[in-house]
C-alpha cells in the first residue's frame, strides 16, 4: 500500500492480466495456480514462472528499492482494488443489505477499505480491530460457544474494545522501574492531568515519546496504549522515526490519531475509524506533513474519550498548545519485532 503511490501501475498491468481471469459467466475470479506453490510448499509461495513473468527477481532485505518495485506495487494495489470491489458488488447484487463486515488479512488494506463506499453500493462498513487470523480465532471460539455448545448471546456486552491484553498496576510498575534503573536515576511520578501536559509539550518540542499505558491492544495496530508518538506538524519526524527508531524503509507512512468530534475538520471521511483501518484524503491546508502520504492520504484513527480516556485527553492537551488534536501514532516496536507488551521490554528497547 505505502509504496504504490510512488509507482506507475500501467507498467505491470499485463502481469496480473495473466495471473487472473474470470469464468465464462464473468462472475468468478480465477487465479492461475501455475505461478504459485503456497498450496504445496511450506517455504515458498511462488515459483520461477512468476519471476520470469514479472521480469526481475525478488528484492531481498536491505536491498535498494528501485522504480520497477514501485511500479509493481502500484499495479498490484490497482489490481487488488478492482477485484475487491468486483466481489463486493457481485455479492451486493444478490443481497439486500447495505452493510459489510470484512475479515481476513486483506482487511488491513486501508487504501482499498477507504474507497469501498465510492465504488460499491455499501453504506456501512465494519472492520474489527483484529480482522486477520488472530481475530478469526476469536470468531471460531464464539461460533463454537454459541452454536455448538448452545450458550446464549449476551446483549449489551462490550465487543468493540481492542484493549484486551495484560496491564500492570502502579506498584508493579514501580518495582520494574526501580529494578531496571540505578537508585540515582530520577523517576518522576505524575497525575494524569500533569502527565498529558508534560507529554504534549515534549511532543510539541520535537521529542519522540514512548507511550505505554493500560492494556495491550489486540491486533496489528497501536491504538494509544502501546504507541510511539510524534509531532505531525514537523516535517522531519517521520524520517527520524523511520531511520532511528523503527529502522525501516523511508517511504513507509505513519498514521494520525485524531479526536472523534474533530476528524472531519481535517480528513475526508464519512465515518469514524476507531481501529486505524481506512486510508482517507487529508483536507487541503491541514499542516500535518509527517502523517500525510505522498498522495495526500492518511490512515486515520479516530479517538473517543469513552474508548481511551487518557489518550483522548493527551490529544486535547496537544490541541491546546498546537491548535490541532492530532498526533503521529505508530506501534511501540522496533523493526521485525512485535509490539512491546510488557514494561520491561518497553524500557529496554526505547
Image (cartoon, rainbow, N blue to C red):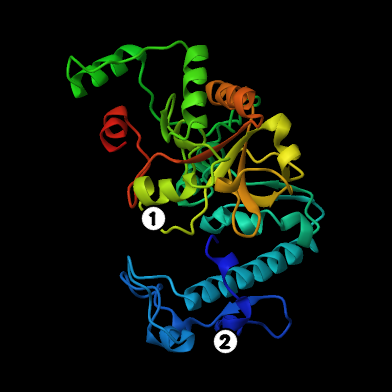
Look at discs 2 and 1 and give the one toward the viewer. Answer: 1
Q: Which residue is mark 1?
A: 248
**Figure label count:** 2
Does the image show residue 216? Answer: yes
Residue 8 lies left or right of residue 177; in this view the side is right
Residue 60 lies left or right of residue 256; in this view the side is left
The residue depicted at 46 percent of the width and 27 percent of the height is: 202
User: In which quarter of the view is residue 296 placed?
Assistant: bottom right
Which label number is shown at residue 18? 2
Measured along the vertical axis of the image, is residue 58 above or below residue 256?
A: below
Does the image show residue 275? Answer: no
User: In which quarter of the view is residue 260 placed?
Assistant: top right
Check the picture and name the quadrant holding the N terminus: bottom right
Q: Position of residue 313 (x, y in %)?
A: 58, 21
Q: Position of residue 177 (x, y in %)?
A: 26, 20
Check the picture and name the quadrant holding the C terminus: top left
The residue depicted at 31 percent of the width and 12 percent of the height is: 171
Among numbered discs 2 and 1, the one appearing first in the sequence: 2
Q: Position of residue 210 (x, y in %)?
A: 40, 32
Amino acid at each position: 500500500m505505502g509504496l504504490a503511490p510512488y509507482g506507475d501501475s500501467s507498467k505491470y498491468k499485463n502481469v496480473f492480466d495473466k495471473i487472473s481471469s474470470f469464468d465464462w459467466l464473468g462472475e468468478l475470479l480465477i487465479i492461475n495456480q501455475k505461478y504459485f506453490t503456497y498450496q504445496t510448499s511450506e517455504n515458498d509461495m511462488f515459483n520461477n514462472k512468476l519471476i520470469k513473468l514479472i521480469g526481475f527477481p525478488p528484492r531481498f532485505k536491505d536491498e535498494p528499492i528501485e522504480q520497477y518495485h514501485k511500479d509493481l506495487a502500484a499495479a498490484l494495489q490497482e489490481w487488488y482494488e478492482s477485484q475487491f470491489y468486483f466481489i463486493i458488488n457481485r455479492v451486493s447484487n444478490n443481497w439486500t443489505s447495505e452493510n459489510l463486515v470484512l475479515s481476513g488479512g486483506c482487511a488491513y488494506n486501508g487504501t482499498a477499505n477507504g474507497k469501498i463506499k465510492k465504488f460499491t453500493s455499501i453504506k456501512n462498513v465494519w472492520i474489527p480491530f483484529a480482522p486477520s487470523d488472530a481475530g478469526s480465532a476469536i470468531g471460531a471460539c464464539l461460533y463454537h460457544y454459541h452454536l455448538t455448545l448452545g450458550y446464549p448471546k449476551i446483549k449489551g456486552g462490550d465487543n468493540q474494545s481492542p484493549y484486551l491484553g495484560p496491564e500492570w498496576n502502579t506498584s508493579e510498575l514501580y518495582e520494574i522501574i526501580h529494578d531496571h534503573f540505578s537508585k540515582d536515576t530520577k523517576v518522576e511520578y505524575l497525575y494524569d492531568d500533569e502527565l498529558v501536559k508534560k507529554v504534549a509539550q515534549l511532543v510539541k518540542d520535537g521529542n519522540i515519546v514512548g507511550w505505554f499505558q493500560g492494556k495491550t491492544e489486540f491486533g496489528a495496530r497501536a491504538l494509544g496504549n502501546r504507541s510511539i508518538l510524534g509531532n505531525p506538524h514537523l516535517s522531519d519526524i517521520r524520517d527520524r522515526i523511520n531511520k532511528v527508531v523503527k529502522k525501516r524503509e523511508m517511504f513507509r507512512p505513519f498514521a494520525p490519531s485524531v479526536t472523534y468530534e474533530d476528524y472531519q475538520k481535517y480528513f475526508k471521511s464519512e465515518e469514524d475509524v476507531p481501529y486505524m483501518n481506512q486510508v482517507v484524503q487529508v483536507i487541503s491546508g491541514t499542516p500535518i506533513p509527517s502523517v500525510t502520504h505522498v498522495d495526500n492520504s492518511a490512515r486515520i484513527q479516530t479517538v473517543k474519550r469513552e474508548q481511551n480516556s487518557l489518550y483522548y485527553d493527551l490529544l486535547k492537551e496537544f490541541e491546546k498548545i498546537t491548535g490541532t488534536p492530532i498526533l503521529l501514532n505508530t506501534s511501540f516496536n522496533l523493526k521485525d519485532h512485535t509490539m512491546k507488551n510488557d514494561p520491561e521490554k518497553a524500557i529496554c528497547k526505547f
